Amino acid sequence: MRRNWPFGLVWFFVGMVAALVMTHSSHVSAKIQKTESRPVSPAASPSSTNQPEGIIEALKIPFADSEVIFADKPVRLRDAQWFFENYSVPQLVEFLGKCQLTREQANDLSKTSRVEIATNGCLVTPSSYLITTLTPCSRARIYSALEGCPFNYAQQYPFRFGVEAFESRLEACGLSSNKLQRLKSLTYTNAGELCFADLELLPTLLSPTEFKQTVDSLYRFPVYQLRLRVPQGANVDEMVRYWGRGGREQKIRPLLSSLAKVNKAEGSTVSIVHLLPVFAQTRLYTYPSAWKDSTVDKEDCFWSSMNFFNDSPDQGFLQPNYTRQELASHYHMVQGQAKLGDLLALVDKEGNGLHMCVYIADNFVFTKNGVNILSPWVIMKCSDMLLLFFPSNEDRKLVTYRRNDMT
């Protein structure tokens, strides 16, 4: 049960926050320490040194379905509220006192913010002034505390960018340099990446056209179309062994051997879609809504990855126990360079699977990032994929699995 605190008591405790802000002098770092046991980071994705797969050429596509873009608009644009789950009022006061709020921010908090007390935590309704004036360090500290609770949707699922990628992601929006910097001032660092969570502020900071274009850019996936370049006289046997994994060598050899005979100095190219198993071929660059499967709303990353080499999907992979049994019986963990068809599993410190995708080549993966109908089957850079599954408050590792009948 939730109840409003009497305003006098609320202001009393918020006043305590202000006092703590004035006296607290120790630095609160936004950097999160990672585990030393092969932690996951965008830079730790499988690397490509030798290239038996051949020369990969990648075209970046700002991918989205315009009919379903911004499907979470109601929750993204609702008035900001911060729910500090399992915090008592004294704990909240102590925490906010360590967030390096300025005197003006503390005064604003005491005058304009509302605190509601629930049986399982404290709900704070911050003012727009407070949100817009937070420093990156303060924002990182507060939002990292919020991200573990599903109520805090924006902090749990922020838009993530490489540290140097914010401007390039929004370059098509036509924003002035001042407005672009204004938006960047609302970002914060989380697990070494730049995050943006306060979309609800943008309608007041941008024109309607600018807002629409910015939303469009934020919701597009950094997806890639890959082509394999086959030089004249290339080592076809080596490429066939790589792209024909899973018993498909005879299916792809005619195409690759023919391309190697094209009489051009630069060789020839082919979309890697033609080299993938049937399951991946047919689902790549599509959304679940395009399929008539009765189970489409349950087809997650594990189902998609485990079915990679299947002509017809095995619906048993919708069941976690079945998936675990198949993984234990028919796969083994490997170290070193991943190969086509290897499963990349993101696991927590207890070994529980959090996400799974399939390695393609040159650090690109076949992935479905979520179980909902807004998540398409795509090819992404491994580093971009990891940005979606890398919260700051948990240790996570990337484990590579290979089918027992493959070397």
Image (tube, rainbow, N blue to C red):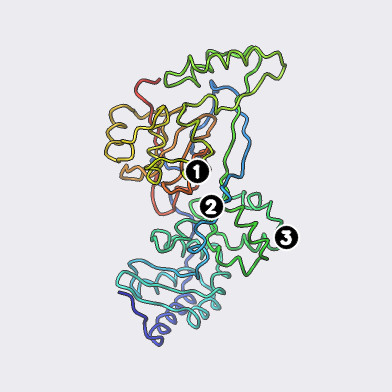
Q: Position of residue 209 (x, y in %)?
A: 68, 61
Name the amino acid, label 2: Val
Determine which residue is flagged by label 3.
Answer: 176
Instruction: Tell which tag, 1 or 3, sits nearer the viewer.
Output: 1
Determine which residue is flagged by label 2.
Answer: 68
Taking 375 as reference, is 123 above or below it? below
Residue 292 placement: quadrant? top left
Name the amino acid, label 1: Tyr
Question: Mark 1 near mark 2, Cβ–Cβ under 8 Å?
Answer: yes
Question: Mark 2 near mark 3, Cβ–Cβ under 8 Å?
Answer: no
Badge 3: residue crowd in 10 Å (few <14, some 14–19, many ≥20): few
Determine which residue is flagged by label 1.
Answer: 287
58 or 93: nearer the viewer: 58
Badge 2: residue crowd in 10 Å (few <14, some 14–19, many ≥20): few
Q: Position of residue 300 (x, y in %)?
A: 40, 42
Mark 1 to mark 3 CA distance (whole Å): 34 Å
SS of the residue at dot 1?
loop
Mark 1 to mark 2 CA distance (whole Å): 10 Å
